Amino acid sequence: KVFTILKESGRCIIQIPTSDSLDFYIWRGRSVWIGAPQHKHLFTDKTFTALAVKCGFRVSGRANDWISPQLFVWSFLYEFERRSGAYIPMEYKKAISLVLLPAHILIAGVAAIFNMSPFKTYYLEKARPS
């Protein structure tokens, strides 16, 4: 639908969580980025690019985004809750994530260096006919 309403010179900017991120690599299916049922499909960089091309777009750019490094530790806290059966109140989760902020920033930096940030922004243009 986006392709049909976009002008020839228009751009479409899409930001999505990607399953080839450091967070997914470490936490697998327990990552908070899965966000079911909001995210019905999870893409890698390769699969999203292939979908964009199939829909008639050309990926003119992409950027690694880490939104909030605190969310990385939330995957850890949810995994802790799952394994221990304990419940951690939201206020405590926020406090723990703030205390661990330096570690979060380091993790996000490593993820960005290796192109494994949890979110990617894609800049799409209509592909020109050959």
Image (cartoon, rainbow, N blue to C red):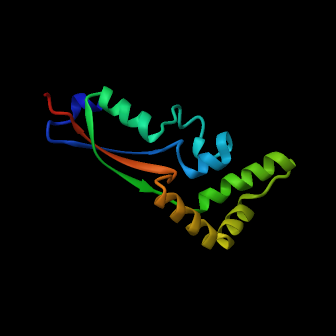
- Location of residue 118 in the rendering, given as x and y in whole percent from the top left corner: 52, 51
Judge from the rendering whether residue 21 lies leftward or rightward of residue 127; answer left or right. right
Judge from the rendering whether residue 92 lies leftward or rightward of residue 126; answer left or right. right
Which residue is painted at 74% across and 64% down in the image? Answer: 92
Relative to residue 19, is residue 130 depicted above or below? above
- Location of residue 108 in the rendering, given as x and y in whole percent from the top left corner: 54, 62
Identify the image quadrant of the N terminus: top left
Relative to residue 72, is residue 13 depicted above or below? above
Identify the image quadrant of the C terminus: top left
- Location of residue 9 in the rendering, given as x and y in whole percent from the top left corner: 14, 41
Which residue is painted at 60% across and 46% down in the image? Answer: 24
Furthest residue to the front? 114
Of the pair 95 and 73, the residue shown nearer to us: 73
Number of numbered discs on residues: 0
Relative to residue 56, is residue 64 depicted above or below? below
Which residue is painted at 67% across and 56% down in the image? Answer: 74
Which residue is painted at 53% across and 62% down in the image? Answer: 110
- Location of residue 87 in the rendering, given as x and y in whole percent from the top left corner: 81, 52
Relative to residue 76, is residue 54 depicted above or below? above
